[in-house]
Amino acid sequence: MSETGAGEIPGFWAVVPAGGAGTRLWPLSRRGNPKFLHDLTGAGASLLQQTVERVAPLAGDRVVVVTGAGHAAAVREQLPRLGDAQVLAEPSPRDSMAAIGLAAAVVEARDPEAIIGSFAADHVIPDGDAFRACVAEAVEVARGGRVVTIGIEPTHPSTGFGYIQMGAPIAGVATARRVRQFVEKPSAERASAYLATGEFRWNAGMFVVRAATLLDLLQRWHPALAEGVRAIAADPSRLEELWPSLEKIAIDHAVAEPAADIGVVAVVPGDFAWDDIGDFGSLAAQLPEPGEGPRVLGDADLVRAVGSTGLVVPRGGRPIAVVGLEDVVVVDTGDAVLVTSRERAQEVKKVVEGLTEQGRTDLT
Amino acid sequence: MSETGAGEIPGFWAVVPAGGAGTRLWPLSRRGNPKFLHDLTGAGASLLQQTVERVAPLAGDRVVVVTGAGHAAAVREQLPRLGDAQVLAEPSPRDSMAAIGLAAAVVEARDPEAIIGSFAADHVIPDGDAFRACVAEAVEVARGGRVVTIGIEPTHPSTGFGYIQMGAPIAGVATARRVRQFVEKPSAERASAYLATGEFRWNAGMFVVRAATLLDLLQRWHPALAEGVRAIAADPSRLEELWPSLEKIAIDHAVAEPAADIGVVAVVPGDFAWDDIGDFGSLAAQLPEPGEGPRVLGDADLVRAVGSTGLVVPRGGRPIAVVGLEDVVVVDTGDAVLVTSRERAQEVKKVVEGLTEQGRTDLT
């Protein structure tokens, strides 16, 4: 149980969108075996399993995972306690609003008063207690009819995340504030300006909201989409028929931003460490710093380092020697080898783009 | 045939010492599969095969290879035209004087007037014609009873090679000069001073000398060693008996340096490019410079490079992606992966030392 006293919350459901190929983590992450299925922190559990475990003290077994049809079997295997109805398989990718909207409709059909919290399957949050304390407060605020997000304290002026501008405090709760606006990924200059104001938080894409409230707001701005997911929830046999016609749109654009414009979004500031492990540079930062040599994800006995730092992932089971390189990244998966630097790790996606262009889908 | 007119020379034998593990080329070069057995230049032939082909226009089939007993089968397989008696298998390593001395004694027994030229199996000389022109002149000088070496024009003040200080020209031949002294691998400062004089050449360990002259000089300074190799040549069945008692000494110390002191050593200056491929940095320099991306030894289709230079060796048959690294070296042999830089490539031997200390002889 949490030390903060944030125990199980009746009527609270966790929705876990498990999507994204993680192409910047190639060759570890593949379309057929994407990053949320991997243990990328050496914790002994995949990112998906860690996400479910993290929220379980609040949601118990009330968890719904939404994933691509191709990954549903792997998700069920990793989460054997979930019933079949708790793993929703998307016939095709239709962006986050359709995925979260369908989960909301399924939960609403079981409990019209339910509150859902949506947490992506591939994020890392080492301090589960701090996370749950924020979620518990977000649930409290969401009961009043608001869409609630969790705003991560920025550690640096990142240009890789969207930001949330906080407004006035909300009376009667500990820390939540109104949201003035969501802003897209900024330039470096603008990001620094955001941080200087103290009003801006990283948008980690976490939303806590009554399922019915989310769907009612969606009904207001995208009625066909709301009606579609509610129709599937009412009769799951219509999934294949209705899914392809659903609008492809992100939840941010479909609901969060327009809801902010009408003043019904709140933010709970979260001071816990958070990362979406976007590339091998941020993956390295999640691993414990060794006394010397590179960080290792996997069997450190396979790594021979001479005057080197960085990250080595010896998934191929073969010895990897690294000599005289600072901040290098070496990933061996047995069928492919990647070598880059922590600094340039974002460009790994170009390799995947090149392989895709050449039809090497066996490797992507 | 050579364009320089250096045709086959009657009575000239090539002696090819094929030894050394090449630990700085790990994991490509192994104790059980050392560098001379590998095609390290993409020429379609191993360094050993290239060495024999290079000298064949002068020596014809008069070639003797001296190698460790463990490599004799591989040497015979790579050089099927050599008779069994032309591959001398050392029961144990006893340094270069025993190896070259045994070959000299075997050749002397067949032809007391024979001249031998000793050329290591793991050197690279792209311009065979220029090499053969030097050797032909060296043979001419050697007929007069001198020990003749070939002095490589230095391209930089290397601290990795020994040097030869040249003296007065020798009358009656094109370019040969007396040798004043051999000097060991110098400091960087001393190497620069050597180059400034114009009198110094790299010692590539090539010796051209009448077999009988070499053995008579050896008899003078190391009589037991000379008698031992001549006894084995007279009765090859005594090899196992006599070999372990032979003195372990390099030909440089046993004969070349004392012979220089008494004024019987000559040098033919060679202006051709030469390299002993001591590490992956010099291996890279042997490969053609591509328009962009790293040099590749092997199948270039396996290499995906984004903003990178250096050397990739995809011997494992798996794709290797390199992103954002300058002068990197990546070697995949299927059972091990090495990543280093061209600059730090000499330190690869530390990996082999570490593996050896840990008893991982399966990998060295």
Image (cartoon, coloured by chain):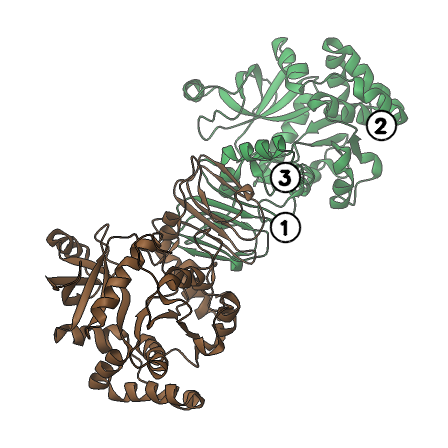
Chain colours: A green, B brown
Callout in the foreground (1, 2): 1
Q: Nearer the viewer, residue B309 or A15?
A: B309
The disc numbered 3 marks a residue on which chain?
A
The residue tagged with tag 3: helix, strand or loop? helix
Q: Count neighbours of disc 3 (C-alpha within 10 A) and say few if under 14, some if 14 to 19, many if 20 or more.
A: many
Left or right placement of residue B346 versus residue B316 in this view: left
Q: Earlier in the sequence, mark 3 or mark 2?
A: 3
Q: Nearer the viewer, mark 3 or mark 2?
A: 3
- Which residue position holds label 3? A35
- The residue wearing badge 2 is A110
Of the pair A13 and A5, the residue shown nearer to us: A13
Please name the residue that numbered disc 1 is placed on.
A44
Query: From the viewer's perspective, is A85 left or right of A254?
Result: right
Estimate the x, y position of residue A228 in percent, counting from the top left: 82, 17
Residue A7 coordinates in the image, percent (x, y): 69, 38
Q: Earlier in the sequence, mark 1 or mark 3?
A: 3
